[in-house]
């Protein structure tokens, strides 16, 4: 992504102004895009914003894959108005950002829902309200929030040494669903030093016939 492909603005949201950042390939008609990738950031009360490095990596990855990447600040963060609402109002924020993106990039555009930590919780709620192409959950905050079941093709990535959301909790959530987890050995919650690897894992997952695991 470059400044020329980055657009930051506010749109009407359910709690007032909602700040969004869009990255879409320049000169590409909406009909030629692969779809819309909606990216949700980590917990607003713990410094989470749309400029979080993992959120940026998710946006960058889907931009490179041909999607219009749309990040947004939950209510009460940055230029977004309102106050933290335990994930309920934040789900409405996500749906508002997606509705706006669909007016711009096409109502029929395929949608990928991607999130990091608390953002995963919100995206699993969004997935109950809309049809999406796929979910991508990085460091999902299971155990901290009531993260429900997800489709079998959901891509879940977690760090082995996550000290915010223990890997054991993620396994306990995934086990009844027989859901595979991509585990980064020696990696903490914030994926420090592992963002290129995260981008590679997602990119491989979007290429038919390519292994998901790096180096496989």
Image (cartoon, rainbow, N blue to C red):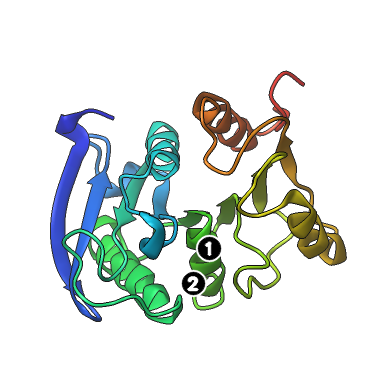
Task: Work out whether residue 47 or residue 198 is closer to the camera in this orientation and state it.
Answer: 47
**Which quadrant would residue 162 be assigned to in this image?**
top right
Give the left or right position of residue 103, taking residue 84 as reference: left
Residue 4 versus residue 51 in the image, above or below: above
Q: What residue is rendered at 27% in x and 42% in y?
A: 23
Question: Which residue is under mark 1?
Answer: 132
- Image marks 2 and 1: residues in contact by CB distance under 8 Å: yes
State the SS at label 2.
Answer: helix
| Residue 183 image offset from top left, x and y in percent | 73, 38
Q: Earlier in the sequence, mark 2 or mark 1?
A: 2
Q: What crowding class fits label 1: few (fewer than 14 Cα within 10 Å), some (14-19), or many (20 or more)?
A: some
Q: Quadrant of the N terminus?
A: top left
Q: Is residue 84 visible in this depiction of the protein?
A: yes
Give the left or right position of residue 95, taking residue 131 as reference: left
Question: Which residue is under mark 2?
Answer: 126
For the residues labelled 2 and 1, the Cα–Cα distance comes to 9 Å
Q: Is residue 27 visible in this depiction of the protein?
A: no
Q: What residue is rendered at 41% in x and 45% in y?
A: 55
| Residue 15 image offset from top left, x and y in percent | 23, 80
| Residue 167 image offset from top left, x and y in percent | 74, 50
């Amino acid at each position: 992504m470059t400044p020329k492909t980055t657009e930051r603005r506010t749109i009407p949201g359910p709690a007032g102004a909602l700040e969004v950042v869009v990255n879409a390939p320049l000169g590409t008609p909406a009909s030629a895009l692969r779809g819309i990738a909606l990216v949700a950031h980590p917990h607003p009360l713990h410094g989470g914003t749309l400029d979080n490095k993992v959120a940026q990596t998710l946006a960058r990855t889907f931009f490179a894959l041909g999607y219009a990447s749309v990040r947004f600040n939950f209510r009460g963060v940055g230029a977004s108005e309102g106050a933290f609402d335990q994930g309920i109002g934040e789900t409405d924020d996500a749906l508002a950002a997606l509705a706006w993106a669909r007016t711009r990039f096409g109502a029929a555009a395929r949608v990928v829902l991607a999130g990091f930590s608390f953002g995963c919780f919100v995206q699993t709620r969004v997935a109950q309200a809309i049809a999406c192409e796929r979910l991508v959950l990085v460091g999902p905050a299971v155990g901290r929030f009531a993260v429900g079941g997800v489709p079998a093709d959901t891509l879940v990535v977690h760090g082995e040494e996550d000290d915010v959301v223990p890997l054991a909790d993620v396994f306990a959530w995934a086990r009844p669903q027989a859901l595979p987890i991509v585990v980064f050995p020696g990696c903490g919650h914030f994926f420090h030093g592992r963002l290129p690897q995260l981008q590679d894992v997602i990119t491989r997952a979007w290429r038919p016939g390519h292994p998901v695991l790096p180096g496989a």
